[in-house]
Image (cartoon, grey):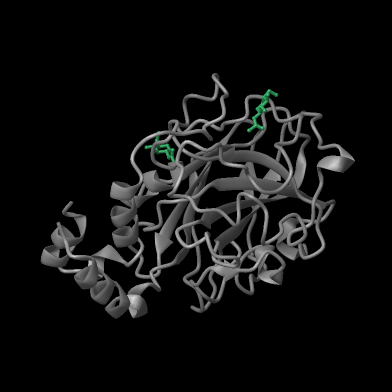
Amino acid sequence: MISPIFLSILLSSSVQLVHAHGWLGSVTVGSQTFIGNVPNASPTGTVIRQIDDVDPVKGASNAFLNCGQNAQLASDVAQANPGDTVAFTWVNGDDGPWVHNTGPMQTYMTSCGSQDCSSFDSSDASWFKIQEQGRITPGGDWAMSLMNTGAPANVTIPSNIAPGNYLIRHELIALQIAQTEGGAEFYPACVQLTIGGTGTGTPTGDELVKLPGAYSDTDPGILVDAYSNPNADYVFPGPPVAAFVSGNTTDTSATAAAAPSSSTSTSGSCKKRRSVEVVNDVRPRTLSRVMKSLLTQE
Ligand SMILES: *[C@@H]1O[C@H](CO)[C@@H](O)[C@H](O)[C@H]1NC(C)=O
Ligand SMILES: *[C@@H]1O[C@H](CO)[C@@H](O)[C@H](O)[C@H]1NC(C)=O
């Protein structure tokens, strides 16, 4: 059992290491993979809008909630079809696997209209939600934690979506310090698509939201202690998944789309998990093996 005093010293000395954070390193649309531009590096051709800072977007009304920190237009557009899987591989600031493991993932889309998304200014766009993912099992780990091994997050393009130019916006909300107002960490990223097919599905007007605009810092899924009651239903911020989205994939595998179900509930230990969560959020790769084993001892 590690002493609380030692733990607090260790954690405060690790504060400068908390900048693990991260960005969308690559995306696979159907069978094509596109590498994102490293934040602040010279841009090359890609379909992922480049950000300039791996730190999270803080504050529900932050303009960078739109597509990430100072997001810039990308030069290219990925061709996609309804029903394709879009696999988002997030990396941390050091290019290793995503480290945060507590909080939901949500996906939105917006139409770029008749123009190619490579010239579309999304700051005032109207977005609809196509997917939301919480915990894998009631009271268990969050789907986000599956990315700690380098696995992508998988999203299915609605199988009946109308063809056209769309931005798809994947968002991680890391909740490890969300019990304090303003603590929630938002990580949005936008990918430029052109979708083919003959679908007719579109959102209704009341399903459309602005980003920022859809969230408040006091929403129950944003100002929330994610550890104290894992059995509580998680309340996803923003609008519900648009009704036209059939076969929505709130499940956690790319193959389980046939059995849509909500993965938001929960049960299980929380005290024990808490110290593990903290370790994962202080860039585990910089902790020595000894420190890690101390921290995970119970
Ligand atoms: C997924 O779709 C089903 C059927 O339309 C709906 O009942 C359910 O609420 C949707 N899930 C989410 C998370 O919106
Ligand atoms: C995405 O799909 C892959 C392959 O099936 C799987 O290994 C991975 O865990 C999935 N990601 C999530 C977040 O469920």
Residue 141, image x and y in percent? 39, 41
Residue 280: x and y, percent? 32, 59
Can residue 6 be seen from the camera position used here? yes
Residue extending farthest to the right is: 205
Say left or right for 96 vs 194: left
- Residue 264 higher or lower than 150, as above or below: above
Q: Position of residue 22 (x, y in %)?
A: 45, 65
Q: Residue at x 62, y 46 (%)?
A: 107
Residue at image x 77%, y 37%? 163
In this rendering, position of residue 298 left or right of residue 138: left
Q: Is residue 291 left or right of residue 126?
A: left
Q: Is residue 88 above or below residue 201?
A: below
Ligand 2 in which quarter: top left
Judge by depth and name the residue closer to the eye, 100 or 40: 100
Residue 156 sits above or below residue 2 on the image? above
Name the residue nearer the viewer: 81 or 236. 236
Quarter occupied by the N terminus:
bottom left
Residue 115 figure quarter: bottom right
In percent of the image, x 50 and y 68: which residue is there?
37
